[in-house]
Image: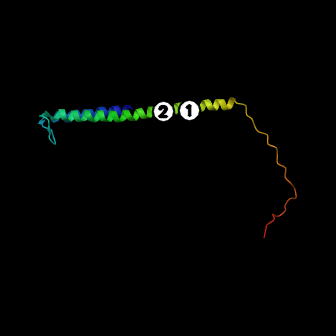
């Protein structure tokens, strides 16, 4: 986890240095929409911030799904453990089957009807 934190800090520093070195004013146009001129540093930092927020939201949804799955699996484990305890406590009833009697010497061929 610390590795990702340090990686994020290094990336943030690189973005900040890049933004400071590119401080000229630019206008942003998208189809019929146009922003007034802003420093390039503000645009770059805004884009980096938007990307960080998007990554956080995607990570958050993944974390919430994992949390929900973990909760469901814990409930399933608890249920199975209770079932196991009940099965160990219940007296085991083994049905006593009567052995089948076999007839010795009854190897008679089956009759076929050739009518």
Residue 77 is marked as: 1
For the point 36% across and 34% down, the residue is 59
Q: Give coordinates of residue 83: x percent, y percent.
A: 62, 32
Residue 70 is marked as: 2
For the point 41% across and 32% down, the residue is 64
For the point 22% across and 33% down, the residue is 46
Residue 59 appears left or right of 22: right
Residue 5 against residue 103 in the figure, above or below: above
For the point 59% across and 33% down, the residue is 80
Q: Give coordinates of residue 9: x percent, y percent.
A: 29, 31
- Dividing the picture into quarters, in which one does residue 109 lie? bottom right
Mark 2 to mark 1 CA distance (whole Å): 10 Å
The foreground one among 68 and 100 is 100
Q: Give coordinates of residue 14: x percent, y percent.
A: 24, 35
* Quarter containing the N terminus: top left
- Dividing the picture into quarters, in which one does residue 86 lie? top right
Tell me the element at label 2: helix
Q: Give coordinates of residue 31: x percent, y percent.
A: 16, 43
């Amino acid at each position: 986890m610390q590795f990702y934190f340090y990686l994020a800090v290094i990336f943030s520093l690189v973005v900040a240095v890049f933004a400071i070195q590119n401080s000229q004013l630019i206008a942003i146009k998208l189809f019929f929409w146009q922003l007034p001129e802003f420093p390039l540093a503000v645009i770059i930092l805004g884009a980096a911030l938007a990307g960080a927020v998007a990554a956080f939201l995607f990570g958050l949804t993944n974390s919430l799904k994992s949390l929900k799955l973990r909760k469901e699996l814990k409930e399933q484990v608890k249920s199975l453990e209770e079932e196991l305890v009940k099965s160990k406590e219940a007296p085991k009833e083994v049905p006593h089957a009567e052995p089948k009697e076999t007839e010795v010497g009854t190897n008679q061929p089956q009759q076929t009807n050739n009518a």
